[in-house]
Amino acid sequence: MDSVKVDVIIPTFHPKERFLALMEQLEKQVLAVNRIVIVNTEKKAFEALMDCDTFLKEHPKAMLFHISQDEFDHGKTRNLAVSNSDAEVFVCMTQDALPADAYLTQELCKALFSDEKIAAAYARQLPEENCSRMERYTRQFNYPEQPSVKTKADLLRLGIKTYFCSNVCAAYKRDIFEQLGGFVNHTIFNEDMIYAAGVIQAGYAIAYAADAKVIHSHNYSGWQQFTRNFDLGVSHVQYPAVFDGVPPEGEGMKLVKKTAVYLAKTAPWLLPKLIWQSGMKWLGYRFGKKYQKLPPGLVRFCSLQKGYWKQEKE
């Protein structure tokens, strides 16, 4: 395991101090990181945090590339980063995910190489200290303590969750990644699940590495939930071969029902907020599924990834 060469891939946009903390944590991993490949959107946005030359001097393992906001794409940008890595394993992360300890890369690789059929392994996401009660429960629902491995045989039992694999923190075997063609080059969202679906359909497996832990959560407003789920709906329409056979609404309703039971017992005053946020999620998703029938201006207004629609127009 110590001989495994691991690179980390991080797209950044307006990085904050937390990103520097992420860099420090990655440099302390027991299974050492070889390279940290950063593709940053807009050089000025990065330099608002730190001068690029200073950053590279302070973090010698880093490779830093800049693109314009119009060039960013969830899939293409990560493929660009991977093309600048030669490691047999690469770990995709987001700029706001913090390793919970020094064993993140080690535990990801342990899960990844536990079976030759495993193509990807994603980490457990733990809530922030300031995380809301509802979001804390959601993290527990989506990222339990028990590890697991998902294959094509789990589609009837798990449905769309079979394809779940989050690039907030996920490790990939490079040889299988290249064999399957990498991430899709143009997608508004869900590049990780679209790739994971290809993994499953090709007969490979995805591991949930519960012992590989990152701290990552959000306290989204109702409108933020709407825009995220709008983009989710768009993604599902654009990739029917991936998502049509495994509709996600059932899994969403299961989470809502379990959260409602939990809140009824522990914090009943939060039930109206749950209803509001769940309604916004559902409404955003349904609007996203019908985006082709909406005026372009309304589509951009509803979308979280507004730059994507400029690319679509071009």
Image (spheres, grey):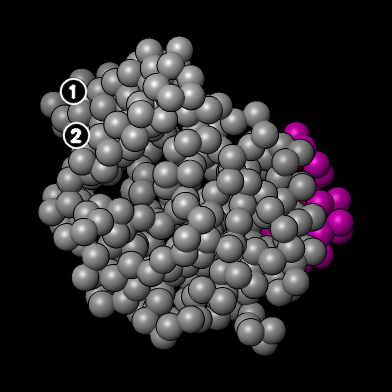
- The disc, 1 or 2, on the residue closer to the chain's N-terminal end is 2
Mark 2: give few (<14), some (14-19) or many (20+) Cα within 10 Å.
many
Q: Nearer the viewer, residue 278 or 61?
A: 278
Percent of width and height locating residue 139 = 49, 42
Q: Is residue 163 visible?
A: yes
Q: Is residue 95 visible?
A: no
- Is 45 one of the magenta-colored residues? no
- Is 53 one of the magenta-colored residues? yes
User: Which residue does the image show at 19% across and 34% down from the upper left?
Assistant: 289
Q: Which residues are magenta?
A: 46-64
Q: Where's the C terminus, which quadrant?
A: top left
Image mark for residue 289:
2
Percent of width and height locating residue 120 = 44, 69
Percent of width and height locating residue 287 = 22, 26
User: Which residue does the image show at 25% across and 52% down from the upper left?
Assistant: 160
Q: Nearer the viewer, residue 19 or 300?
A: 19
Task: Determine the secondary structure under disc 2.
Answer: helix
Corner quadrant of residue 264: top left
Q: Where's the N terminus, which quadrant?
A: bottom right
Q: Nearer the viewer, mark 1 or mark 2?
A: 2
Corner quadrant of residue 88: bottom right
Image mark for residue 146:
none
For badge 1, the amino acid type reads Leu
Task: Determine the secondary structure under disc 1.
Answer: loop
User: Which residue does the image show at 69% across and 66% down from the upper left?
Assistant: 103
The CA distance from mark 1 to mark 2 is: 10 Å
**What residue would you read off at disc 1?**
294
* Left or right: 4, with 151 as reference point: right
Percent of width and height locating residue 232 = 31, 39
